[in-house]
Amino acid sequence: MTYEETMSYIHSTLKFGSVLGLSRIEKLLQFLDNPHKKLKCIHIAGTNGKGSTTAMISEILMDAGYKVGMYTSPFIEEFEERIQINRVNIPKEKLCNIIEKVKEAAEKVEKESKEYPTEFEIITCAAFLYFYIEKIDYAVIEVGLGGRFDATNVIEPILTVITSISYDHMNILGDTLSKIAYEKAGIIKERVPLILYPQVKEANDIINDVAKNKNVDIINVGENSAHYIETEVEGSKYFQHIIIKTLKNEYDIRLSLLGTHQLLNCATAVYAAEKLKDMGLKIEKEHITKALSSVIWKGRLEIISTNPIVLIDGAHNIDGIKKLDDSMRTYFKYNRIILILGILADKQVENMVEIIAKNAYKVITVAPNNDRAETAEDLCNVVKRYNANCEWEREYDKAYDKAVSYYENGDLILVCGSLYMIGDMRKVIVNKKSRNIGIIKWFGGYNPRIKKFNDFGFIMRDGQEDIYFNKNHIHCNVGELTKGRVVSFEEGLNYKNRRPQAIKVNLLRDEDNIELLKQCVESIMFDNIELYDKLEMLWKLNWDFIEKNWNNFSVTLKIVYLYRLCRENKDFPIIENINEKNKIIRAMLLLLWSKFNGGEASMVFKKAAKLIEEYRDEIIGDKDAKRKVVSFIIPTREKGIIDVLKPLRYWSIMEFIESCSKMSIARELENSESPLINMIYAVNLYTKIK
């Protein structure tokens, strides 16, 4: 199956609805040889916070050195987000192969029982099968809906966790907290320990009764176990400094997830980690604190732009909206809120609107991409009962542009109401983020007046005349200035109507301007150009010029450039022409040369092997890089990284580097000082070029 066929098949099973019960998935898993029974799982249920808690526990296990599968729903931007190993989405080709096997099993189920498995059951089976094939150490599984009859409840976990319980999905789970709590408590298994978030008495009593009947040891998270100290800001990143006190220890944590509700979610994850340690896992205090400072959970009180300031949050029920409203006052200072709101019709729409919309300066309603969505126009009519400054938009990009047009310095744009909406809205905003509004980051271009490269400020448009403003606010006509020689493009404001307008100018890749290219490479602004464009520029220049500037290039650029040389059978001058002082880089470059020159490279290969052996730890890079990338690309984690780099296996290093390049690599690692990661990035970039 192709990826398109795979996704079409998955979505086609939506017609079978969302039918609670375990009989279909149990039969489906039997035909797949029950992969779920061969996994060590942590099972997490709850109304709010179960996704964040899943992410935090997964991150702690990863930081402790384990290979961790994580299954969550729904996805925010890409379907593959739902099934991850060590924070990396399931590759599309592996998803296709696994879904094909699940599809064959599903057809057998239908033939035998006259029932076809639901979409969620098929995806859940795919996750179990993928985790088993990839030989993970532990799987952290988030319940889809409820717990008792949820498809994930076929597992026999080593630990269960129940997060905050409140009103949601009442048409399915019941109209009282007691009924909802009973459904959530359905994940409790005989003699399997339970970590329990502080609950209201009505829910707590039900859960305790179920646990008692199943001889379960309950570890209650203390209601006062988490204490907020302050919010810390580093550039565009926000952290909340908190103290977690358990019965065993005290943790000083810089939590990378914002929200007052995340304090007790964090405490729940810490309690879970302590219990897992008691069960024999090698989890230390530093693993917990480090993991919680780097955990990522998209779309939950997430700042995705600082100019304008844009906050998105997946709050989609009364409890979530109340916590969002509380967090807005705790963590942010702003003059006015411009709100983009989308809600599913089966939620408590009016109550949610009353809480979040009444204090907004402007409200723009949209419809989530879901069959259960409240239409943008109907939602707008509800909002107008509490806030007259409301309008609706069908298209997400127009809604965002409209919000930006109302934005002034000191304001905040908030996007919330449904997880099914914020994912698509997040894509719209991220795609526009690099085109900042107002005074944007400085970028450079060729100035014909002074005949050299210099810095410019932001772009404005006045009718047909484009104007650059430099740092001294001296303007000149962009038509005279560019002529294909500007090396970046940005978005600015029209200073008459204050609406954002994009102005795109050509990148500096004109072969007729070799001298301009050289000037640019030798100028200070070269450091601020995107790596892809740097490579394209260098590719047009001769080796003598590049050699002269070689020591000014970054590690990443050197390896990317030389990898392209090798792949396109160009001369490889690094061996004779450059005295590369960094032996680590030299080792990787020698390895590159030997890879693409076959038998003639045996002497060079031996030199590379010797250098790699001498500098093997440095080649892998820092622990953070190792944890994020290397831990999931090594064929067998237990053998460790050193075994992989034994001299007899050097010939295979390039093969696994090339296979790794197909995986997603975290943006923060693209300029890593680790040569191994730069090699992976080089292969990835070359694939894009070709």
Image (spheres, grey):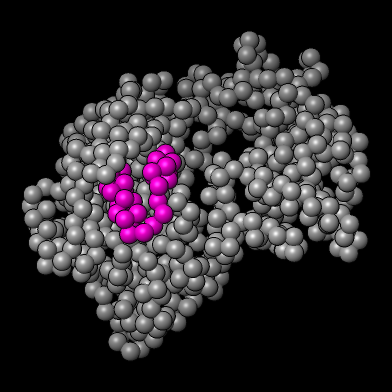
Which residue is at 30% across, 66% downward? 157
Left or right, 541 with reference to 494: right
Q: Residue at x 82, y 39 (%)?
A: 580
Q: Is residue 545 above or below residue 411?
A: below
Q: Report the side of 347 relative to 129 (left or right).
A: left
Name the residue nearer the viewer: 146 or 445. 146
**Which range is magenta?**
265-293
State whether the magenta stretch is mostly helix, strand or loop. Answer: helix
Q: Name above or below for residue 621 compared with residue 135.
A: above
- Residue at x 58% of width, y 63% of height: 639
In the image: residue 442, left or right of residue 349: right
Q: Quadrant of residue 335?
A: top left
Residue 232: x and y in percent read 39, 27
Q: Nearer the viewer, residue 203 or 688?
A: 203
Is residue 374 in view? no
Of 665 and 383, nearer the camera is 665
Residue 287 colored in magenta in the image: yes
| Residue 422 screen position, x and y as percent | 37, 46
Q: Quadrant of the C terminus?
A: bottom right
Coordinates of residue 259 in the picture (x, y in percent): 30, 37
* Quadrant showing the N terminus: bottom right
Apparent side of residue 13 relative to residue 583 in the rendered image (left or right): left
Q: Which quadrant holds residue 651?
A: bottom right
Visible residue check, residue 256: yes
Percent across and percent down for residue 328 are 29, 31
